[in-house]
Image: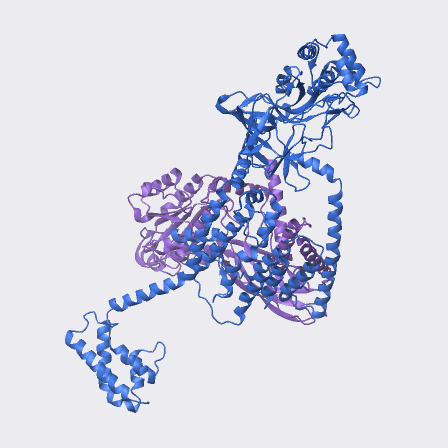
Chain colours: A purple, B blue
Amino acid sequence: MNSIFKLFYRVYRTGTVLLHWSRRRFTPAGLCVVGGFIVTSSVGADIENTVIYQTFTLLSGLLILAAAFSWFFRGKFSITRSLPRFGTAGQPLRYRVAVKNLTARPQNGLALLENLHDPRPAFQEWLAFQNAEARRTPSFRVGKRRRSHPFRLATVKDAAVPPLPPRGEAEAHVELLPLRRGILRFTGATFARPDPFGLFRSFVTLTAMQTVLILPKRYPLPPIALPGAMKYQEGGVALAANIGRSEEFVSLRDYRRGDPVRHIHWRSWAKTGKPIVKEFEDEFFVRHALVLDTFTDDPRSELLEEAVSVAASFACTVLTQESLLDLLFVGAQSYCFTAGRGLGQADRMLEILASVRPCGDKSFQTLENLVLKHVAVVSGCVCIFMDWDEARQNFVKKLRALDVPVLVLVVTEFGEKIPDAGPMRDEPENFKVLEMGRIEEQLARWK
Amino acid sequence: MKTPPFLLGATLLFWGWQSDLLVAGAIMAVILESARFVSVRWDFSETEIRRIWNFCTLLSFTMAVYAFTSSEEGGNFMGLFQGAAAFHNATVTTVRTATAFLRWLPLIFFLGVAAQVFSVRDTMPLTAVSLWLRRRRNREIKSGKKITPVRDVNITYPYFMVCLFSAGIHANEGSESFFWGQCVLIIWALAPFRSRRFGAGAWALAVAVAVGIAFLSQRGVRELQRAIEGYNAQWMARFFHGPTTDPKQSMTAMGQIGRLKLSGKIVIRLWTENGESPPTYLREASYRGYNGARRSWFAGNPQRDFESVIAETNQTTFVLLPGKTNNASAKIACYLIGRSSESGNPSGLLPLPTGSGRLENLNAYGLQKNPEGAVLAEGPGLVIFDALYGPGATIDSPPENNFSTTNFDFSVPTNEIPALDRVISENQLLGRNEQQTLQNVYGFFQGKFTYSLWQGRDKLSRSNETALTRFLLFSRSGHCEYFATATVLLLRELKIPARYAVGYAVHEKSGKGYVARQRDAHSWCLVWNEKTKIWEDFDTTPGSWIEMEGKRASLWERFSDFLSWIGFEISKLKILWGQGKLREYIFWSLIPILIFLLYQIIFGQGRKRRQMRQNKNAEVFFWPGLDSEFYELEKKLAKHIPRQPGEPLSNWIERALTHTALTDLRTPLNELLRLHYRHRFDPAGLDAQERKHLTSEVRNCLAKVSRLSKL
């Protein structure tokens, strides 16, 4: 069976290479000519009943000549991209590219094509995706269709290069549409020159590596009162920086073993002859845990993408308030990142979320252990799940048994049956099911 | 992207010229190009564009229905309902059918492209064209999902390609007009895409080279195609058409070494009435002359060829033997797997029960019979008919009553005579009368011979003895051709007229009927009964042959039978399509839908406008304050002092009152405006007195304004 899949994988790789090559090499007019060439080659075989073969010969002549012209393009260029640090999935990213002509000949009518890192997965990842897709869209099911271009990271429009004088410079404007979060790697750029007919393009490619981090898509959230009250924070001032009631002096008391030396009140010690320390008000502030479910065996899970987007939306919203946010998830290992109140801003959290990968080799228990370890310091938990199975319901039950207020968000496929709230039945306002494709609307309507 | 000016017109003219539809092409060209000079544009909504597109699609379907039920050339619509002619056309050639349909494509999609050209939007939404996109969008709307934006497309370039393609769908008469015409049009179409990096001269040179390559290539392609087609055409034909029975000769497999391989493919299906037993044999042809050297049978006198059998007035009944009483009937379905050399239609010999006198419900284009009892039909690939048969006369010509060497019914090759005579004398086959002789011959073969499909090397002769001699004297085992040939020649040697017959043995029941497979192909002997003056079947092949053949059934036979049944049912549907009224019903049922769609396209907009007007009236009636007389005043005053779009009434009145001629109206106008606003927007509205006051004051002001000739 594996060998059959390997064969399919080869076909996939070859097919995508051909498609990529033809899309870049041929202009839209060229693709029409190629289409006409294919049609006429099949219909024109009957030269007695049709004269279509004559069109076939003309189209062949045009294509042959157009391809022959590609041999005569010599040029030397250099480029410098003015790339922003971040982009956002689904939002067009526009940037400038400074282009320099290194030859003594003017160059006109060129197009700049950005070369991105090959997004095609290795065999194992491809196989995992195919299996996940087969489970998601069972055979002969009309409702759900297979995802097209699941591995593509971004689409880049061809940028017209202004006329370049000999050894001159110009600026091209490139528009890129990131399709997925993560690191987008540029490997180089290609200068394309069409043939006289405008059908086929010849290339000069140069290496120019660069990266840009694509942040997850975010949804606007209305002001949400997250569950949970303020709680004593052991770190105190260190965590709170200068915000809130951090240095409120309360009283003096005798030194106890373990008290920090910097809290010793020297004057009182001198007066009384025994060490006296200052007592401060305990540090109370809101600290939320953002628990992200990453457990899926689909390496290109759309559900995970949406879950990450929802988490990113929460991170952006919560971190504008005066609170801490712990992001807890499991990837290659268990992670806990804290942000807020001077410990890092939303952009740091988004960077982390941009790098979240699906976890297919660990059980949900790992995340449960991680959260339960942290639960003592958090005011409340925001759980973003991709499923609402028994394991997750038990986890929520445990949190509630520990008196931790919980807000549960379950991201589901579009059109799936809304699951029963289970342990959250008594708090329906804290249990939300978000359908893919309607998440923005559902979050916007959240009261 | 839009096509360059006049390209579509020129292409339509070119299409009309090439397709012999010049008038239609010219009209369409004028209509499309007139859009450049006519400023009138239609504001089609997406629904209307979709309706137009649906019309085009349905029209193409109707045309396809028509084209595939009639193989008339494009432009001739009259042959559709002409009985037998339509029936004939319905099933003849697919090539002509397809070409006719493809030739009409510019006509079919003309309305769509005209709608775009004369539309204010200049493009066509993809949702109007694509059913899939439409479904997706409807689903998104229904589910409340975010609607995926869909592009609009300009269909002039696709239409250009369709026109050019259709222009090339005609027989190649050696003219080069199409080549040069398409060169001009394609270069014209590609001109807007040319790279500005290269000068016009370089571009023109490149075009000239490309056209030169194309010109030489198209000549080369033609030569190549001819060379390929000429190569062993006979072998190719054999490969594709498979074995068929030749009414003029039958080459036997006698003398071949190894096992005879015949497949289990079902070739004939037969049903009898009221569970009667089927005829034992279905004969396809009989032969009179035997050529020992070639081991072949020949029909006989080449001078007496096939003669036509005229159909009865219902066109489906053919009388083979006038006046014959037929007391049995069998429905037979068989494939005509040969091809007529004249018309190219499927043709083949009909397998008929012995004594068939009449064929009914046979939808053949033509039927012929020969003196050897072969009935050759030309028709659709599958024919299903009722064969009425009974004992008595057959269509075979009687034997000639002389024993000359030219009388094929008595002729025996000289090299076979010694063996035959030896067998006759050794086995005392000559009886007292003809009946006894036949019994002796039958007993001889049944007692001393065995059936075998295998001929081993040990049975090869060491001298120049014939295959038949070896069969009669040494091996005494063989397949039916040995038995039939030996029987015919023995009987002839015994002075009894005999002929060699080929066809199928019917013995296998299948469902409610019977089937005959390719391996049921059989040969036997026809013997002349001098008393009854008829040819009778005389089969000396041991009865075990059926059992032996049955043992060779493949494991896949049931599966292949199932496939054969599916193929048969599909062929039946085709026959029903071609012969029945179905296509007429479909054609006529599509016409009202087309008319309805056309009505919707033409009058739909007007109706909408009417509806909108009605709604407007309703609005006037229901909206509070819209009946204010102040509007009349505003209208009158606006003639002198135009009100800017979006300018509030109060500002406009204030601006108007700056004119000295209106100074007197300052107080009443401000008062009226206040009342008008209250009438319009105050939920409490005006009381009766105030309403009356508004009306009367407006009248006064109107009178004053009318008196102002010029402000």
> Based on the displayed image, in which of its 4 quarters is residue B1 positioned?
bottom right
Q: Position of residue B120 (x, y in %)?
A: 47, 67
Q: Is residue B132 above or below residue B13?
A: above
Instruction: Give the side of residue B680 with respect to residue B109, left or right.
Output: left
Q: Is residue A67 above or below residue B586?
A: below
The foreground one among A41 and A90 is A41
Residue, far right: B463
Q: Position of residue B530 (x, y in %)?
A: 66, 17
Q: Position of residue A306 (x, y in %)?
A: 44, 50
Which quadrant of the rendered structure holds the N terminus of chain A? Answer: top right
Q: Is residue A190 above or below residue A360?
A: below
The foreground one among B396 and B677 is B396
The foreground one among A92 and B118 is B118
Residue, far bottom: B660
Task: Report if residue A234 is visible in the image.
Answer: no
Q: Position of residue A214 (x, y in %)?
A: 51, 56
Residue at 53% from the left image edge and 23% from the top image edge: B327
Residue at 42% from the left image edge and 51% from the top image edge: B139
Which quadrant of the rendered structure holds the C terminus of chain A? Answer: bottom left
Q: Is residue B584 above or below residue B708?
A: above
> Based on the displayed image, in which of its 4 quarters is residue B200 positioned?
bottom right
Total number of numbered discs in the rendering: 0
Instruction: Give the side of residue B452 with respect to residue B4, left or right.
Output: right
> Based on the displayed image, in which of its 4 quarters is residue B517 positioned?
top right
